[in-house]
Image (spheres, rainbow, N blue to C red):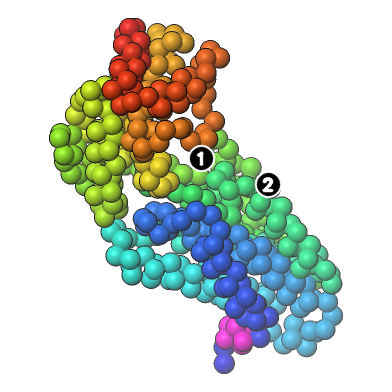
Amino acid sequence: MTGFRIELRRTPVRWWSIPLLALALSMVLFVGGDWDTSWPRASAAITRADLPLMIAALALTAQRVSALHRGRNEALLASRSRSRLELTSLAADVTWLAAVYLTVTAVVWAMMWSRGAPGGPWLEYPLFGICGVVFAAALGHTLGRLVPGRFTGLLAAGLGYLLFLVVFPSGESPLTATVGYEAIDLRLADAHLGWRLALTTLAVLVAAGTVYLVTRDRRRPLIALIPVTAVLVGLAAMPSGSESPLVQPREASGSACADIDGGGEVCVWPEHEHRLTEAVGAATRVSEAATDVLPMTITHREQGLERGAAGGFTLDHGAADTLATLAREYVDRAIPYCADWGEQQLAAHSSLRLWLDARARGLEKLPDYNYQSFGGSDYRTEVEETLTRPDAEQQQHARTWVETAKAVTC
């Protein structure tokens, strides 16, 4: 039996694989918003499993390596190459942890395929997650080698919590534990994925180099310091923060479109083709609500299909948000924003958005959103009062908002 197979059978990580699988699946299935409507969201949701797995990888590998060097395994250490033993141990731990992550991935993909969702998985997210597990395991291995003690595992778990939830919070760094919510028009930034791969590779090299730093044989300490220095430089140089977001805009390679009854068109991302009927129905309701106020035919495009263009509706936040964003887009295209507008024009434009949204939804009162007021004018009250009037009076009052907004043009 090879050394790797021996380590696979003797590592305590294997006993943790079942509870970790249950925890990781729970993070994906029950934490955060729904993701089963599109492959981009499902692919990103899998990274939620990375948080418990990375903390566990850091703690378990640190505790295992620490126990290996606390004086009870002299015969084992003497009978095998120390560097080979430790790297084989790390490989076995990573294999069990990666198997848990890949099992979660397979479950999510199977659920998506069973629903017949168009498109397919975005493979950069499984790669992102596996890199996180390997990085955390290598870091834990190094910590256990440098600070062997009875409570090294607990120390590593606390360090992992701080590292992946506080120092590198979600959405800001290649070392973040999860990507978070993923809009269909965004995808993982190439720069961040590249840095995550590089830092993971360096972390493994550091774990290997630690053998030479701590061993009694001091003939090659400088060689071992090279990857350590490289990791420190990489951590200092990696992109992070608002100037380098973890996700980047996605270029549209096509779209799925359908006509609206009475004129106009609705276009969605190819992955949302199965929701095109839903989008057309919502756009029809907005168009009907705008009758005799803003009669026009427009092409509604899902967010991100036209980079730099005004508007763009969304399908990923529920039916109410779809109607709200379609109403916003309708008003924005009928009366484009003008930089020379004053408070009255801004308030009239916003009032039109709110009124059209409420009309499309059949509401007589605005939802409890925190709408911004321009210049202190409470146009929310005016819109709600308008919604209580008969339809003809509502349309007449809404036309006064149209006239006010169009009074100043660019």
Which residue carries the number 1 mark?
A: 245
Quadrant location of residue 362?
A: top left
**Residue 311 in sight in this render:** no
Task: Tell me the SS state at disc 1.
Answer: loop
Vertical position of residue 59 compared to residue 84: above or below? above
Image quadrant containing the N terminus: bottom right
Vertical position of residue 33 compared to residue 331: above or below? below
Residue at point 44%, 71% (across, down): 107
Q: Position of residue 402 (x, y in %)?
A: 32, 15
How far is mark 2 from mark 1, CA to CA?
16 Å
In magenta stretch: residue 139: no
Magenta highlight: main SS = helix
- Say which of 297 and 153 sits in front: 297
Q: Residue 368 — which label?
A: none
- Say which of 183 and 173 sits in front: 183
Quadrant location of residue 236?
A: top right
Dot 2 alpha-carbon crowd within 10 angstroms: few under 14, some 14 to 19, many 20 or more: some
Amino acid type at image mark 1: Pro
| Segment colored magenta | 4-9
Task: Tell me the SS state at disc 2.
Answer: helix
Image quadrant containing the C terminus: top left
Vertical position of residue 220 compared to residue 4: above or below? above
Residue at point 46%, 62% (across, down): 126
Which residue carries the number 2 mark?
A: 167
Q: Position of residue 369 (x, y in %)?
A: 52, 34
Amino acid type at image mark 2: Val
Residue at point 50%, 22% (across, down): 381
- Say which of 352 and 106 sits in front: 352
Apparent side of residue 211 relative to residue 333 in the rendered image (left or right): right
Residue at point 68%, 48% (across, down): 166
Quadrant location of residue 314?
A: top left
